Image: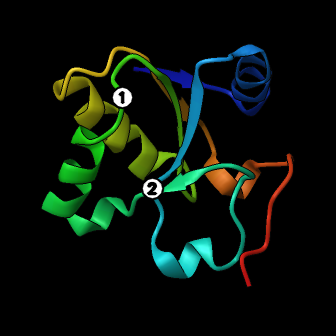
Amino acid sequence: MEDLTQEEWAEQLAKDENAIILDVRTDAEVADGIIPNAIHLDIYKGQEFISDLEDLDKEKNYYVYCRSGNRSGQACKIMEQLGFENAYNLEGGMLDWTGDVVDLE
């Protein structure tokens, strides 16, 4: 697991052909907008969240974010315990995000 600044995260993501973006916020938060192409898995869903993670390809590189960077940091630690080798936490989360956002409404 690695904490990346907004710039590092966006730059590394742009060059990574093996990347998957993971949004671990709640449904209500996601309704306000989501980073394009992100997969939404709510970390607050407990065992369902773990099960959903276990269905993902561990060979991919995961760029994980939440509202502020705290839950995504926890998600990266959980992913590490499940055997994911490349999980990158977005420091500052959506609060600091200046990149593209898609409105789901």
Q: Position of residue 53 (x, y in %)?
A: 29, 43
Q: Position of residue 90 (x, y in %)?
A: 59, 36
Residue at position x 45%, y 72% in the image: 26
- The residue at the far left in this view is 47
Q: Which mark is residue 97?
A: none
Q: Which residue is mark 2?
A: 24
Say what secondary structure mark 1 lies in: loop
Lateral position of residue 100 relative to residue 87, left or right: right
Seen from the viewer's position, the closer of residues 9 and 56 is: 56
Residue at position x 70%, y 77% in the image: 32
Q: Earlier in the sequence, mark 2 or mark 1?
A: 2
Q: Position of residue 67 (x, y in %)?
A: 57, 59
Query: Distance of mark 2 from mark 1, alpha carbons?
Result: 17 Å
Which image quadrant for residue 34?
bottom right
Which image quadrant for residue 24?
bottom left
Q: Which mark is residue 57?
A: 1
Q: Nearest to the eye among marks 2 and 1: give it.
A: 1
The residue under label 2 is which amino acid type?
Val
Q: Quadrant of the N terminus?
A: top left
Q: Quadrant of the C terminus?
A: bottom right
Say what secondary structure mark 2 lies in: loop
Residue at position x 85%, y 46% in the image: 99
Seen from the viewer's position, the closer of residues 45 and 3 is: 45
Seen from the viewer's position, the closer of residues 83 and 69 is: 83
The residue under label 1 is which amino acid type?
Asp
